[in-house]
Amino acid sequence: MATPSSPFSFLGDLFNRIGERLQPPDWAVHEIQHRAVLFLNHVLQQEPEAQQRLLRQQGRVVRFQWRFVTMQLVSTPAGLLDLAPEGAEPELRLTVTDESPFDIARATLRGDKPSVQIVGDVQLAAEVNWLVDHVRWDIEDDLARVIGDVPAHTLGNAVRRVAGALRQFVGNRAAGKAGGSAGTFE
């Protein structure tokens, strides 16, 4: 008799099949990567210490990979990021080993980092880890430029409350599974 699978495993399988079959054209991938670099640089420009750390790593290439998604970045003389030239050999390879996007989302909601395989330069890996741990997007500040300080702060508080409730829910679910009970939620 077949064991019932969760809706998340079905969605994960569906995501896998779609991802394997539907590869976007190269120009679309390149454009998405450029937009990601612009966003990362926007966030980095809000943190001078991050730019100083990247400046020390000028010209070094890091390859990020998750499943079929790959991006190689190089640090620039301005202490920012750019796409690495085609064929550049990375000094550091970071591969997210969690296959399921739902597992990654669940870990993120718990405040954990996804599992990553790290191969390459230890000092560069330490700098990347510092960036991941210390650089945050101040979305409330960016939003305040568009809608004003008070509405941005109000919206930010609401989002933080929702995120906190989600973290608590995910934490309770994880604790319930670890304890062997289904648990009830009110």
Image: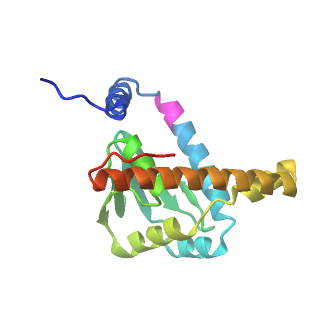
Q: Which residues are magenta?
A: 25-29
How many numbered circles are shown? 0
The verdict on residue 182 being magenta is no
Residue 8 coordinates in the image, percent (x, y)? 36, 34
Say which quadrant the N terminus sits in: top left
- Residue 154 versus residue 168: which sits nearer the camera? 168
Which residue appears at 40% of the width and 45% of the height?
70
Q: Quadrant of residue 76?
A: bottom right
Residue 44 coordinates in the image, percent (x, y)? 63, 63
Q: Is residue 29 above or below residue 175?
A: above
Please indicate, yes or no, whether residue 87 appears anywhere in the rendered image: no
Magenta region, main secondary structure: helix
In the drawing, does residue 130 fall left or right of residue 148? left
Which residue appears at 71% of the width and 51% of the height?
158
Which residue appears at 86% of the width and 56% of the height?
150
Q: Residue furthest left?
A: 1
In the drawing, does residue 35 fall left or right of residue 92? right
- Residue 173 versus residue 135: which sits nearer the camera? 173
Q: Quadrant of residue 149?
A: bottom right
Please indicate, yes or no, whether residue 170 appears anywhere in the rendered image: yes
Q: Quadrant of residue 144?
A: bottom right
- Residue 10 versus residue 40: which sits nearer the camera? 10
The verdict on residue 27 being magenta is yes
Which residue appears at 36% of the width and 30% of the height?
7
Q: Is residue 34 above or below residue 21?
A: below
Residue 97 coordinates in the image, percent (x, y)? 30, 51
Q: Is the image coloured rainbow, by chain, by secondary structure, or in one colour?
A: rainbow
Q: Is residue 55 above or below residue 161?
A: below
Residue 174 coordinates in the image, percent (x, y)? 37, 53
